[in-house]
Each structure stands twice: as structure tokens, then as C-alpha cells.
Amino acid sequence: MPTKYIDNFEIEFSAERLEGCKLWGAYVAVFAPSGTPMHRLNVRRKHRVAAVQQFADAESACAAAEAAAQDIVASLKAGPAGRS
């Protein structure tokens, strides 16, 4: 699962084949550092992003997940007032 760091957030993004078809879905999980070096806080559990979109290949799904991760982190940085 590819991992990317945006500010202090650790982002895991992936593509998974959708059940019953040959298309792919985009998934993202967001973690923040904890006080314990061997642990991390699960800020957003792994969930499907771009839920209405289905992708022909895993690479396209991963690219969409990575783009969605940018929006998720921006929302988290904005605080509760910036979340929808």
C-alpha cells in the first residue's frame, strides 16, 4: 500500500478491485503521529473516496485516492469549522 506524508499526516492510499466487476475503487486512510513512537493515531479509517467513480485500472484509482487525500488533509487542517 503506497504511503505518502503530507505535513504531519501519514496517508495510505490504495486501489481495490470492486466486487462483481473488473473495475477498481480508490481508498484512503489518514494517520497522525502519537506520543508513542511505535504507534500512530487513526484519524480517518480506510474508506472509499470518489465513491461514484469506478476506475479501469489500479493506477487510475490510486491517482484519484492520492488527490482525495490532499482534500482530506486540508479539511483536517481547517479544523471542525472547515469540515463538511
Image (tube, rainbow, N blue to C red):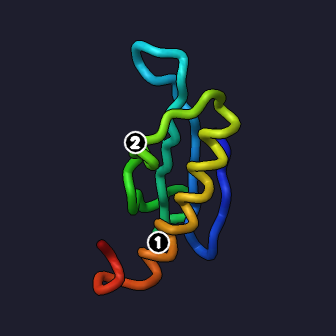
Q: Position of residue 3 (x, y in %)?
A: 65, 50
Q: Which of the numbered marks, if any, corresponds to residue 35?
A: 1
Q: Amino acid at mark 1?
A: Gly
- Mark positioned earlier in the residue sequence (2 or 1): 1
Q: Quadrant of the N terminus?
A: top right
Residue most extreme to the top: 20
Where residue 22 sits, quadrant-wise, is top right
Query: What residue sits 29% from the left and 72% below the top?
Result: 84
Q: Position of residue 54 (x, y in %)?
A: 50, 34
SS at mark 1 in the image: loop
SS at mark 2 in the image: loop
Q: Position of residue 59 (x, y in %)?
A: 70, 36
Residue 45 lies, with reference to residue 84, above or below; the image says above
Q: Amino acid at mark 2?
A: Val
Front residue (pair 21, 82): 21
Query: What residue sits 58% from the left and 61% below the top?
Result: 10
Q: Which of the numbered marks, if any, corresponds to residue 12?
A: none
Residues packed near mark 1 inside 10 Å, few (<14), some (14 to 19) or many (20 plus) = few
Residue to which mark 2 is pinned: 52
